């Protein structure tokens, strides 16, 4: 019989910061795009700033996304300002075009509420007991009587 070796789980931050794992360049790129997005948000009108992101730089094109078509429409009017701003940043002088896309924000599912528990009353217990008395099936009648007893216990102070 062979022994199974278990490794100690690593934290996500440790995995991401370990050099040589192939993830470091992706992480650096994400930080770079986040910094560009912050810079861009500083130069557009405040109402628009929270709805836009720079999502990619490729082939001398900056890809800027908005979270809805309405914000994208407003964003397009600011294309010359955005292009000038990006071209002023070190290493981005070569950017010659800004491309715009809609990228909706993923909706966060509503918070799950704990299941509601049915509340029983004395009247409910009486109905259960009365129903049990009229049942032909003894097994079902006994189950209803037990349930009626539990209801009585839960409603008695």
Image: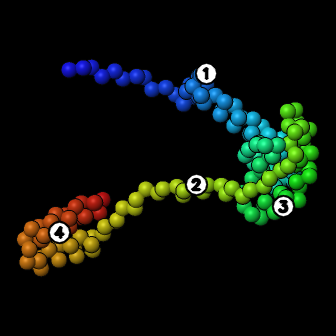
Q: In this view, does 110 lie to the left or right of 153?
A: right
Few, some or many residues within 10 Å of mark 2 (<14, 14–19, 20+): few
Few, some or many residues within 10 Å of mark 3 (<14, 14–19, 20+): few
Q: Is residue 153 visible?
A: yes
The mark nearer the N terminus, 4 or 1, is 1
Q: 22 or 73: nearer the eye?
A: 22
> Viewer-nearest of labels 1 and 2?
1
Residue 144: numbered disc: 4
Q: What's the residue at 31%, 67% (across, down)? A: 120
The mark nearer the N terminus, 2 or 4, is 2
In the picture of the structure, the residue carrying the numbered disc 2 is: 108
Q: What's the residue at 25%, 64% (across, down)? A: 151
Q: How far apart are the alpha carbons under marks 1 and 2? A: 33 Å
Q: Quick one: SS at disc 2?
A: loop
The mark nearer the N terminus, 3 or 4, is 3
Q: Where is residue 101 in the image (x, y as percent from the top left)?
A: 74, 56
The mark nearer the N terminus, 2 or 3, is 3
Q: Are marks 3 and 1 in contact (CB under 8 Å)?
A: no
> Viewer-nearest of labels 2 and 3?
3
The mark nearer the N terminus, 3 or 1, is 1
In the picture of the structure, the residue carrying the numbered disc 3 is: 74
Q: In this view, does 86 lie to the left or right of 65?
A: right
Q: Are marks 4 and 1 in contact (CB under 8 Å)?
A: no
> Viewer-nearest of labels 2 and 4?
2
Q: Quadrant of residue 156?
A: bottom left
Q: How far apart are the alpha carbons under marks 2 and 4? A: 42 Å
Q: Quick one: SS at disc 4?
A: helix
């Amino acid at each position: 019989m062979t022994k199974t070796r278990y490794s100690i789980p690593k934290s996500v931050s440790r995995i991401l910061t370990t050099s040589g794992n192939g993830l470091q360049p992706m992480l650096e790129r994400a930080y770079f795009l986040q910094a560009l997005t912050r810079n861009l948000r500083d130069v557009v009108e405040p109402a628009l700033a929270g709805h836009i992101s720079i999502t990619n730089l490729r082939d001398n094109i900056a890809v800027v996304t908005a979270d809805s078509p309405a914000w994208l429409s407003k964003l397009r009017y600011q294309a010359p300002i955005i292009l000038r701003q990006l071209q002023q940043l070190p290493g981005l002088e070569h950017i010659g075009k800004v491309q715009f896309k809609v990228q909706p924000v993923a909706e966060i599912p509503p918070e799950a509420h704990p299941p509601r528990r049915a509340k029983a009353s004395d009247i409910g217990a009486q109905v259960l007991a009365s129903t049990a008395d009229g049942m032909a099936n003894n097994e079902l009648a006994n189950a209803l009587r037990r349930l009626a007893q539990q209801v009585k216990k839960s409603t008695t102070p």
